[in-house]
Image: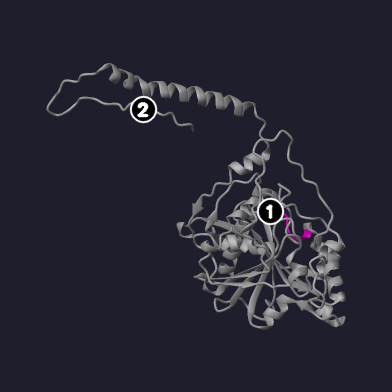
Amino acid sequence: MPSFPCSHKIQSNLSESSPSVHYSRNHRYNYFSPLLIFLNMLVLAKSSTALLKNAPISRRTTLNRLSFPIRRDIRTGGGNSFVRSVFSYHAGQMVRQVANIDTLPSPVGTIREFNSSARIYQSMNISDTPLGTKEGSMLMDGLDVYTVSASEDGHPLTVYGIGDSVADPTDEDHILLMLHGRTWSSVPVYHLLGGPANAKKGYESRSLMEALNENKIRVYAMDFRGFGGTPTDASGTVEPNRCVEDVESVLCWLAKRHGCKTPEKISLMGWSQGALVAQLTAQRSKPLFSRLILYGSIFDPMVRYPRDPLYVRNPPSITANNNTFDAAIEDFTIEGTIPPKAATYFAEAALLADPIKAQWKNLYQFNNCDPARVHVPTLVVSVES
């Protein structure tokens, strides 16, 4: 709103000892000056309104307008229903167990209205994704797969666990939730060649989830919307803040599942661009975990992502691009870090899990990453070439 300078102050010769009021010519000018300012502001406001009415506003503008956070504390008593569908994968066979409905408190985070309805997602699960196929299910051999409803819109989020057949979850477990990166699902990233079926075939397991489980860590991994076993939502895209909200939904579900009254036993790890999502989650006022691991983070304080234009005439178009084998192995640039066969296995598994490249948008939300706002113990893992 423009400011209008006024060089005259409104004065009145009014005092307790003098009940009479005297106005000079300058006083009369000062009396009408606020009225003139108000009329100018009214004309300017009407002109701006007319311009905005004539400007075409895309759906992208609506999403930006609704991006202002509204905080809700976990102790307010508000709750959301998390529908938990459990799948077990053994030797490529998918067995669906009975789904329970758990009422969990809403995670501390942003409450936003997205243009989607929970009713749309009630019947969706991993079967509607590439990992729901026969070939895709082989990648999850030995994993327990859960469907957790997002607290915002009920969207099904696929979470992978391991070790449920050995021990039930308790509040004494050390829990780790892992987040994948920009392009590939958590399954090929954290469970490559894992499971008893691959062991029988003589393959050497490259599963980080199995290695951590053998070291008494209850490890979980999740897929963001549009990746691996999590279906895409109505927007057809994925954005950082929405990922943060979904991570909080899963963290809240883990606390309920293991009976954790405090976040002391829960840790969060993010890989590559997922490390930025983990960092944003840690910057919330009351993070639902106690330790943070940034593994191969791409955070760079000198990089600023641009914002999309507010007023555009052309509707936003989402072009679906196929992932490629070369794109799957482009990160393996240092000789000796991974055998050629293992790199090939990863590329093939990654293409099975994510044949279509997920479309990120609103990357400017990563500009909010600020190490000074992280107040949990943090381990940064990086490699210098």
Please tell me which residue is depicted at 66% across the width and 34% down the height of the picture. 57
Amino acid type, callout 2: Ser
Q: Which residue is mark 2?
A: 7
Q: Quadrant of residue 173?
A: bottom right
> Is 50 left, or right, of 375 in this rendering?
right
> Is 225 left, or right, of 74 in this rendering?
right
Nearer to us in this view, 222 or 314: 314
The total number of labels drawn is 2
The x and y percentages for residue 177 are 63, 69
Please tell me which residue is depicted at 41% across the width and 21% down the height of the picture. 36
Residue 108 showing in the rendered view:
yes
Q: Quadrant of residue 195?
A: bottom right
Amino acid type, callout 1: Gln
> Is 15 left, or right, of 265 in this rendering?
left
The x and y percentages for residue 353 are 80, 63
Nearer to us in this view, 344 or 213: 344
Residue 100 showing in the rendered view:
no
Q: Which residue is mark 1?
A: 122
Q: Which residues are magenta?
A: 121-127
The x and y percentages for residue 111 are 55, 51
Mark closer to the chain start, 2 or 1: 2
Nearer to us in this view, 168 or 201: 201
Give the secondary structure at mark 2: loop
Give the secondary structure at mark 1: loop
Check the picture and name the quadrant holding the C terminus: bottom right
Please tell me which residue is depicted at 63% across the width and 79% down the height of the picture. 217
Q: Residue extending furthest left?
A: 17
Nearer to us in this view, 186 or 36: 36
> Is 324 left, or right, of 304 in this rendering?
right
The x and y percentages for residue 346 are 82, 70
Relative height, residue 269 to residue 307 (above, below): below
